[in-house]
Structure formats: C-alpha cells, structure tokens
Amino acid sequence: MFTTRDFITTGFDDVERARRFLGAPELAPCDPAHLLEGLSTAADPDQALLSLVRLAERSPDVTGFVADARIRPRLFRLLGASEALTEFLLRHPDQLSLLRLDDAACGQQSAGELRRRALESVGADGPDGQWVAGTAGPEGAQALRVAYRAEIVRIALRDLNAADPLAVMPSVGAELADAAAAAIEAALAVARADLAQHYAPDDVAKVRLSVIGMGKCGARELNYISDVDVIYVHEADGLEESDAAGIAAALASAMSQIVGSSGMEPGLWEVDPNLRPEGKDGALSRTLDSHITYYERWAQSWEFQALLKARHLAGDAALGRDYEAAVAPMIWSCSERDGFVESVQGMRRRVTENIPQQEVARQIKLGPGGLRDVEFTVQLLQLVHGRADVSVRVRDTTGAIRDLSEAGYIGRTDAIDFDSAYRYLRVLEHRIQLVHLRRTHLMPTKDSARRALARAAQPPSAAKRHSAELLMDRWQQTKRQVKSLHERIFYRPLLATAANLSTDEVKLSPEAAQARLAALGYLDPQGAMRHIEALTAGVSRRASLQRQLLPILLGWIAEGASPDAGLLGFRRISERLGESPWYLGLLRDSNAAAERLCRILSSSRLLTDWLEVSSESVAWLGSDDELKPMPAEQLLRENAAKLRRHNNSESGMRLVRINRRREMLRTALAEGAGLIDVEEVGASLSNADGACVQAALTVAEKEESDQRELITDVVVIAMGRQGGQEIGYGSDADVMFVHRTRDGADGQAAQEQATRIVTRISQLLTAPLKPAVPAEIKLTVDAALRPEGKQGALVRSLDAYREYYRKWALVWERQALLRARPMAGDEALAAEFMEVVDHVRYGTGLSEDDRREVRRIKARVEAERLPRGADPALHVKLGRGGLSDVEWLVQIIQMEHAGEHPALQTPSTLPALRAIADAGLLEREDAELLDAAWRLATRVRSATLIATGRPSDVLPRSWQDLEAVARWCGYEQGGGGHLEEDYRKATRLARQVFEREFYGFH
C-alpha cells in the first residue's frame, strides 16, 4: 500500500514504526492518500501519526476529519506541532469540535468575547468587575481551565495554518494575552465564590480589586506558555484598611491557585506578583495611594521600565484605569533620573551574564541577538523619547518599533530588520513552547526536533520544507542582525545625552529654547531660534529628526568656541544635504558622528566651509576607518586614474585639486577627532601635496609632449618642512627642480624644456579654474632654496647640481638639504640626485667655522626676520623655544654626527630628535622638552588656521581666537589661558636647552 519512498517523502524519521501505525485498525476507514497528504503537512509526521492513532482509539469519529479537505490540514498541523494539545483533546474528546469551526469562528476573537466565554464557563453573575461564579471550588477551576485550553487550541489552529506566520504573530500574542486576562477574570469570580466560606459576602463585595498585567501579558504579546506577571491594587469603602487588604490578598492568592495549582485538568501557568512594590517582601496588594507613594519615593529605574507594559487585565476596570493614569507620568519622566540610560544598559548586560554558560548558544530569548536585545532596545528608546513624544507611548514591541520608526528614532531599514527579526524569533519561541506547553526558550539540540521546528515555523503551503540546517542558518543570521542593531542603537550616545535634558528642553518650546540657548552661551538666542525654526518647521521626516536631534546637538555645539557660528554651519550643511537619507540617520545612530560634527562646526570656520562644499564628507565622521588618511600610493593611483579619464588635461587637474582639498579635510577631521597626532598630520598633508604635484608634472609633460618630443626627465624634490613632512594646512611647498637630458638630446634644448615643464607645474597648481574649486587653499611651490636662490636657474640638470655642490655649497645650503626628499617625477633620477645630496649633507661633518656660521645665521634670523612688534615668547615659528629653535638644534647635530650615526639621516625633526637621544648626543630629558615644545607649537600653528581661517605664526591675542585654538588643541572650555600658560612654559624650557646646546650658553 505504502512504499518506502512514500514514507521518506512524507518526512517520517522512523519508517518501520510509521508503517505499523498506518496499518492500525483504528485508521482503516481512512483513505491512504488522504493520510499521506495530511501527514506531509505536519511538522513532525511521526508524532502526528501516533497522536492520530490515539485519538481514533478514543474517538473514532476523528477519522472523518481525515477525509474532510477543509479540516484535514488543520488536524495534522495541530497534531504534528503540539503533543500537549493532543493530550488535552484526548482528555476532552468533545473539544475535537473545535476543528470544525469555520474561518470566522476560528479567527481572532475580541477581548470582550473571550471574557464572556470564560465567565460563562464558570456560570459567573454579578456587576462588572465583581463577578461571582456559580460553579465554585475544584469544579470551577476545572471548567475554567478546560475553557481556556479550548481557546488555546483555537488560537493554535489559526496560528499553525496561517499563510504567513510572521504576519499573524502580533495578533496571536494579543489574543493569547486576552485569553489569559479572561481566565484571570473568571478565576477571580471563582475566588469570590470560594471566599464566601471565610468572609462575609458583603465585605468581599466591598473590596474593589484590579489585576494589573505586566510584561508580555500587559503588552498583549503573550507566549503560549508563560508566567503572567501581575500587580494587585485595591480600594474598599466602608472597611478598615487591614480588613480590605486581607480580603484583597485572599482573593489574589485564591485566584492564583485556581489558575495554576495541580488538578484533574493541569494548571495553566503561574501568576507571578513579584514585580509589585518591594517584590516578594512587599504586601501582595496595596491601595492606589500606597502604590503612588512607593513609586514616588522608593522605586528603582528598572521598575519604571517594567511599568511601561502595565495594563488593567481583570477586576475593577475603573480602578485599573486610575492606576494606569497615576503611574503614566512617572513612567515617562523616569529617564530624567541620574544615570537612567546607563542603569538600563547595565541591567541588560547582567541578564546576559547570568545565563548558564551551557545555555548561551541555545538561548532564543535572553542570549546575545535574542528577543531581549530587541525588547530592551525598543523600551529604552521609548522611555527616553516618550516623555516628549506621545506617539511612541505604546506597550507592544512591534507597535513600538513601527511608531519609533515613523517618528524617526529608528531608521526605516533598521526598523524593518528589527521587526522582521523579532517576529521570526517569537514564532520560533511559540513553536518550541507549543510542543509540550512548557516554558522554554532554548533551541532544541536533536536534529529531528530542529527539523520539526523548521517545518512548524513555515506556512502549510510552503513549496519546500526547511531542513534543520536551514533553520540554524537563518536563526544564526537573525541573531547576528539583532545583535548588530542592538549594539548600534541601544548603546547610542545620544540616548544618555537626551535623557539628561529636561522635558521643556526636549520639546524645544520657544521660551525654554531661548532661555537654554542663552544659558549655553549663544550670543544671539533669537538668531539661533530662527535657525532652529528653519530646521524643524513642517511635518516631514527630516523636520521630525531635526526636532529629535537638535536639543542634544545644541549642547554639543555650545561646547565649541563659537556656538552661533556652529549652529549656522549646521543649518547650512543640513540644507545642503537636503533629503539625503543617510545624513540625519548618521547623526542619530552613529557613536561619534553627531558630537564630532557639532564640535567641528563651532570650532572651525575653515572646516565648516570645507564641509559645506564637500558635504558628503560628513559621512566620514561616523567611521574611524573613513577618517584615517589615505596612503600616498592610493592617492597617486586615484589621481592617475582621474587624469587618464580626462586625457591628462587641465580638467583632470581640477579633480586632482579637489582631491587635495578633500584629503586636507579628512586629515583635519581625523586630527579633530583625536585619531592622528601632529606627525601623522604632517605626513598626510605632505602626501596629498605630493600626489597633487605628481599629477601637475604628469599634465605638464603631457602638454609638452603634445607639442614636441620629450627630451628630458624631471623630478621635484621637496625641501623645508615639506621635505620633512611637517607641514601644516595650507603650507607652501618648498621645492627644487632637477632634470636629466635624455640620451642623444641637446642639453640646451633639454634645459629649456625642463624650464617650461616646471613653470607649467606652478601654473597648474594655482591657476584659476572654471568652475573654480570652492574653498580651496592653493598649493604654491617655492623654489627659493635652490642653488643661488632666486638668482639661480629655476631648474638644473643633475650634473649641474653635482658640480655646484662639489665646488660652491655653503653651509646653509648643506643645512637646507637635510630636509630634501623626492616628491614627484622619475624615480631613478630622484635616487641618483639623493646620492649626491646624501654626500653633501651627511658626508663632510661640521668644522668649527661651519658651526660659527650656522650660529651667526640663526642669530641674524632671530634679529631680522621676527616681525616688528611680535612677542618673541608667542611667535610659534621664530620665537624663543619655538619651531625654529628646535629644528636648528636638531639640524646642527645632524650635520655634525649623521655620518657616524645613520639613524640621524632622516628629513623629519622628531624622528631625528629621537635618534639623537638614542645615540646619547642629547640628554633624553632635554629631547623630551624639545619634542613637547615642537609638538605644541606645530599644533598651535595648524589650529590657528583651522580655527580662524587665517594663517598666523603668532599665538592669538584675541580671547575668542585663542579659545578656539585651545579647543582645537584639546583644552576644555575656557582653556585659552591654560594653553598660553602651557605654551610659555614649554617654549621657555625648550629655549633653555637650545641656548645651552646650540650656543653653548651655560
């Protein structure tokens, strides 16, 4: 009759046992084809077949269901998914009639209808909220439990046969909660009847008791089997409070026993009142005033999080509504408590830490990436934002995700992912619990159980049955997704900051906003309000997100030196980015972007301009990796690609110059974020300049080759701070140009061609462009350090350099060559030139006459080049203990000792200084003083341009500019004076070392 292939196709694990059961006499009336068809839809065909045989033995009429095309899939989906409900049908065969219900009767029933049925099951009568059962004692409990489980069978039939289990999950959870509330209502009616034996009926009737649902039952998202968390509140007129409390406690205890104690029909679930004030140590029931007093005085933060789900379930409805109304203001203001966000985050970590180690990997509910991650995230967002935004004040998780997304607190894509993952995890939880109706949240370990779970989670019409492997893959993927979203949203810094604002500040009401703006240090509160109104006007999602973000951002903007300019900059960038979907979402979700942006806008005019013209760069602020400067090789490749696409033309050069501005911005943002130090800043800026010069050389050579044959190769040698890779933002590029005539070419013609090429390089780097490069700081090349200075040839051949340095090199030229470094052009030619340079700068040592000449030149520079009226103590380049002092001391030591100490052969100041200390040529303590002074002077020099938009070598005298420089240098608000004090001290100590070691003063 049945082949082995039939059994395997149907999904049986034990073919021989299935063969025996299918041949059982109880199933003789069934058509074999109907049996196989029905069993193929079951999650666990082996269990479904066994259950069918047992049911047919007890109630032969069940075989008729197999033949009914409408009932058959319902029957087998139920039998294959739940042994516990099969046992219920075996105990109560009359309940098999549930399988005959039409779709409407099997569909979701209202809370009122479920309560009516539950009360009817115990013959309850009386006024609403004071029902008294006609069937009391064990018989009442038995009737109530049977009626409740019949509802569970009906709900399970709807759930298991749904075309989309994830879509119906919220309504299933809501109906399960409503069924539980109805059971509690009926149990209270039985309890009142039972208490008539111990208390006067009139006294019992005077006690108004309301059962408040908490947790999943309160949120109407209950599981098939779960503790029902409750809180009891009572009032009584005409009774002493002690008597009323005693009756209320007796009613609550009796109700709990009626629902959950052992009996002929097993208990339903535990009623857990431990979320009440003072927990297990507190009174079982309290008056409303007592509850309010406790929550106002003693409640901890977690208790208000729990109250987020509080809802009247059963008993006196008016009292329940009064309770809800009384606790609501406390729920929605609890996030203003000190450390509230951190306490909720800490509680989630403790939940994870307390999971038994052997269960962590199997946890669907409590583990990382589980249901609790979703629920804690959603609840924290609600509690922080719900105090000012009533639209997110909902109890259920899926509804909260929806409303949080609509209000802009969660991105649309994140909300869709969160909602889908939550529904999927809840469906898995429901199916696992349905098997035995036991409280469990653990993924099964047996392959057969996982396979059954995979099938149970699918709709009956699924074209392909999922395997255990597919189930585990999807579950692990879901966990990873939830964990990622949880970590990104739950630990969002904006939450803690938002929680510290008052409700008026969050709402941005005009009066509160202007007062706060003035208190924060905005000089023009009315002007700031105009910016705020422009950003938040309307009902668009962008305006909603701005209303959410601005109360927090205003504080961060105010921490900069110029809050008013910062807010204006924020408005300009926000308007420039318009409806870009990523912008405001980045500020809301990123761990760092919002705070970084605010502090930059209120601290730097230059960066505000750069960000406005390159607004997509704001996205870098959310990623440390994006802010890291590009390696030189990557910049060269990118520029080369752009030039190729534009045939090495002037239009391609425009893109190269935009790239340089972009990398200057990236470097500044990274410095402002504390990701790179002054050495890395100099290297990054030098790399950007070098890539730009290389591109200009490429274009210049291309233009020359279009006119005539190239007969010479050209290299650009970086000099000065450019050579040492120690430049600041917008520094000129000190260079020398070198060329070598190609074989067979005329030397004079090659010299003329090289001159044209290097002249064109300067033009390409600075010439006006159409369209212009906005906010560009042009790169000016300066060849003044070439032999004979400005009187000498702009470019020389390699042989000419070799001959000049052999015959005529002065000590200052040797000193200048200490910083020489190839920047652009032919690598082989550059290497040969550097061999010549190395001999000149390192190979001859330093005579006493040379030493005197270097000292003389340095003294002359100090006397003549320091601007008239400048304070020598505050000039970062030429002042006492400034950049020049440190660099000249390092260079004189290099010229004297680099030949015998190769580690000194570097064009950069700080590496040379470290090598000098390592070689014992300078006391390490002195080297550290010089290092500190040089770093601070370099930082101040760059910060002055960044903060004010103007280059300057003098520590600002204006308080506002000095404050802005100090903030960029990492000082706290009001730190301008401390910066000047630190600078004076550092440079004074550095000058003492310089005078002792350079001039020999003791």
Image: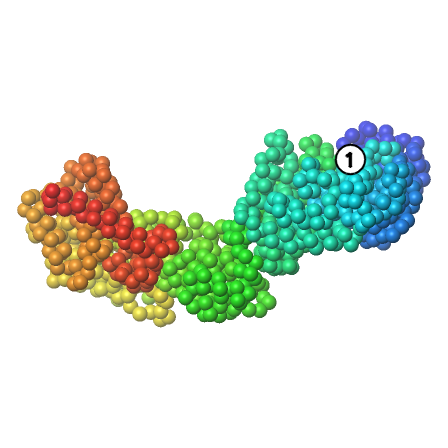
> Residue 466, how many percent across, how many down?
70, 41
Q: Residues within 10 Å of mark 1 (few under 14, many from 20)?
A: some
Q: Please name whichever residue, 339 or 530, is drawn nearer the observer in this view of the structure.
A: 339
Residue under the image location 89 percent in, 36 percent down: 138
> Residue 555, how many percent across, how many down?
46, 58
Q: Is residue 517 above or below residue 970?
A: below
Q: Quadrant of the C terminus?
A: top left
Residue under the image location 21 percent in, 46 percent down: 989
- The answer to which image quadrant residue 344 occupies is top right
Q: Is residue 705 above or below residue 449?
A: below
For residue 980, say whether it is visible.
Answer: yes
Q: Please name whichever residue, 586 or 713, is drawn nearer the observer in this view of the structure.
A: 586
Q: Please name whichever residue, 936 or 321, is drawn nearer the observer in this view of the structure.
A: 321
Hey, which residue is sitting farthest left in the picture?
Answer: 849
- The answer to which image quadrant residue 600 occupies is bottom left
Q: Amino acid at mark 1?
A: His
> Residue 422, how many percent across, how many down?
66, 47
Position of 834 with respect to 651 (left or right) is left
Position of 642 with respect to 552 (left or right) is left
Residue under the image location 67 percent in, 54 percent down: 328
Q: Is residue 523 above or below residue 220?
A: below
Residue under the image location 75 percent in, 35 percent down: 438
| Model colouring | rainbow
Q: Please name whichever residue, 511 or 342, is drawn nearer the observer in this view of the structure.
A: 511
For residue 221, say whether it is visible.
Answer: no
- Secondary structure of residue under mark 1: helix
> Residue 399, how many percent across, how many down?
68, 54
Q: Quadrant of the N terminus?
A: top right
How many marks overall? 1
Residue, disc 1 = 436
Q: Is residue 948 above or below residue 52?
A: below
